[in-house]
Amino acid sequence: MHLRVHLRVLRNAAVTLFVGLVAINLSCGAANPPEQRYSKEKLAESLSVDKPGLLIGEFELPPNAVVDGDTIKVNGLDASLRLLAIDSEETFKNEQNRRDAADDFLSYYKRIRGTHRRPRKTQTPMGEEAKKWAQDFFEGTTTVRLERDHPKEIKGRFKRYLVYVFVEKNGNWINYNLEHVRAGMSPYFTKYSYSRRFHDQFVAAENEARAAKRGIWNPEAESNKDYDERTAWWNARADFIKLFEDRANGRNDYIVLTHWDAMDQLAKHVDQEVSVLALVSSIRQGKRGPVRIQLSRRLFDDLTAIIWDREVFAQSGVETHKGEYVVVKGIVQIYENKYRKRNELQLVVKTPSQITRSRVPGIPMGETVAPVVGASDGSGKSSEPSEAPGAGGPSAGKEGKK
């Protein structure tokens, strides 16, 4: 019976993958006529998760392609884009915020931040300037080239393509994401990882913009005033991710949940122990039954880690890390989701040390977890931790106390 259930999960995953590939190929074929330099056959191949690569393809820009500084639209894809390594400030979405910012920007900014623990997305005049800068950058451009940062990082949580955008200027392909940072329109955005391909270039571009006081780095600019706080938080997360990825190299039991094939890899490890890197999207506690930790993958398609022992849950400290990265070590099991009427995979966690939390500013770690990463200056080189993500630790007592 167990073998049949296991095979059914693998078969369902294969059918879902096949249907998705057919849909992508059909939509892309209709949007890319053969006279384009990048053929529809090459496009279908680049979008296929059977042979994912770094190059996605070349795409035409529609009229009004620029949505804001870090969002553009292209013809021929079935989803929108999330531009990697940049995070422009928001454009104004309502006139009240525009007027409040114009009357007294600092008062407006403090009101938006309020008492929130973390910096917030803020609509600012600099957001408007970033959009204008993007419009000028793409002026006269009809075609852009899209590339990935990692072959297995294809779409984000909201099913947007994760991309670098390149524009051909004077015979050279220019990285828009990088130039946006160099112009001071965005910091180097590392909240979801360092750039694996262009890290040093992004660091140099931000340093150049800071030194020249361009854009957001101009003290007189009406922009976010907490970038030092933001970058300390982002870099701590990026250090944690990089350390896990380095240790996962060559190991099939270390799984990054955002990779396109993560669920397939988990299905190959039923009844075995794996270590999974993921964001904690939510935690569900009922009066009875296990605590359910939802690990972020795709909207409405998260992976559940369950803890039956409430004391284990309390000692793990994971409740402090909603919205932050953790590594969960657990046994992969198949269970029947009666609400969705299908079999799904879950992780079973039995000891507090099976959850390793990222050490990020602003969250007290207590004595139940060892330091995970050292302080970062954004170099992408974190100090060696006393307990690495996924390494586990003692199964009883105060885990990893130093």
Image (cartoon, rainbow, N blue to C red):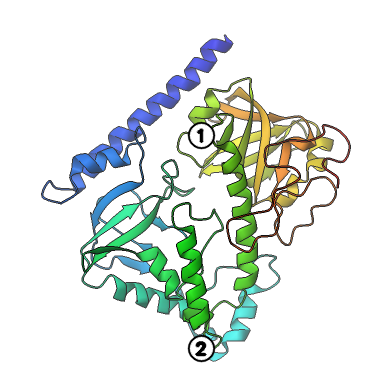
Question: In terms of depth relative to the viewer, which is nearer, 250 or 100?
Answer: 250
Seen in the picture, residue 240 relative to 225 is either above or below; the reply is: above
* Residue at (57, 42) in percent of width and height: 245
* Residue at (45, 63) in percent of width and height: 201
Residue 167: image x %, image y %? 28, 63
Residue 39: image x %, image y %? 17, 45
Distance CA(mark 2)–CA(mark 1): 47 Å
Q: Which amino acid lies under the numbered mark 1 shown in the image of this protein?
A: Ala
**Nearer-N-terminus badge (2/1):** 2
Seen in the picture, residue 255 relative to 113 is either above or below; the reply is: above
* Residue at (67, 50) in percent of width and height: 322
Residue 385: image x %, image y %? 72, 47
Mark 2 sits on what residue?
102
Q: Mark number for residue 17?
A: none
Residue sticking out furthest to the bottom: 103
Q: Is residue 329 visible?
A: yes
In the picture, the quarter occupied by the N terminus is: top right
Question: In terms of depth relative to the viewer, which is nearer, 341 or 372?
Answer: 372
* Residue at (65, 54) in percent of width and height: 382
Category of crowding for the residue at label 2, using alpha-carbon neighbours closer than 10 angstroms: few (below 14), some (14–19), many (at least 20): some
Q: Judge left or right: residue 394 versus residue 191.
A: right
Q: Secondary structure at mark 2?
A: helix
Seen in the picture, residue 251 relative to 318 is either above or below; the reply is: above
Residue 177: image x %, image y %? 40, 64
Seen in the picture, residue 22 relative to 169 is either above or below; the reply is: above
| The quarter of the displayed image where residue 122 is located | bottom right
Mark 1 sits on what residue?
262
The answer to whether marks 2 and 1 mark residues whose Cβ atoms lie closer than 8 Å is no
